[in-house]
Amino acid sequence: MRLTRFTDLALRVLMRLAVTKGEDLPTTREVAETMQVPYTHTAKAVARLKHLGLIETRRGRGGGLTLTPAGRAASVGTLVRELEGPGDVVECEGDTPCPLRSACRLRGALRRAQEAFYATLDPVTVAELVDSPTGPLLLGLSPTRSA
């Protein structure tokens, strides 16, 4: 299974915020620059994560992004399910429906594999994603001005 770029970015935003210490909160632009992704994509991910109650945003001087306690404790499996949305690994109905769809065993097998993928991620929390060596590496990243 392959995650969308949006889900990948949203998880990286959460990981970056999970290592934030003190009053120096990163802005959306700083996170985008650090992760070397476009600001607009990062802003969309931040908006979705805020809507889910996983991060808080503060405007103005001393503002920035912060991870909520719910965000820190969030299950990666639950997050991926939410961010990826409903759907099967393969498109059986689409514009050109598969002629095997009425008797296909592959679709069910792939659905079970997808659920096993999510189930493997269920016990992992955002906080655990930044355990060493990842957290120290994230802290060492500095923004690049190419985003």
Image (spheres, helix red, strand yellow):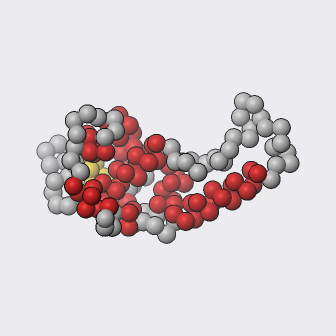
Q: Is residue 69 visible?
A: no
Which residue does the image show at 38% across and 37% down from the upper left? 41
Q: Residue 101: x percent and y percent?
A: 81, 43
Which residue does the image show at 34% across and 39% down from the upper left? 37
Count of marks overlaid on the render: 0
Report the residue that reaches farthest toward the left.
61
Q: Can residue 3 be seen in this view?
A: yes
Q: Residue 114: x percent and y percent?
A: 63, 56
Report the residue that reaches farthest toward the bottom.
123
Report the residue that reaches farthest toward the top.
95
Which residue does the image show at 75% across and 55% down from the upper left? 108
Which residue does the image show at 31% across and 36% down from the upper left? 39
User: From the viewer's perspective, is residue 92 above or below residue 53?
Assistant: above
Q: In which quarter of the image is the C terminus?
A: top left
Q: Residue 128: x percent and y percent?
A: 38, 67
Observer-nearest of 29 and 35: 35
Observer-nearest of 79 and 4: 4
Q: Residue 110: x percent and y percent?
A: 69, 54
User: Which image quarter: residue 145?
Assistant: top left
- Left or right, 45 with respect to 67, comes to right
Observer-nearest of 134 and 13: 134
User: Which image quarter: residue 91?
Assistant: top right
User: Which image quarter: residue 113?
Assistant: bottom right
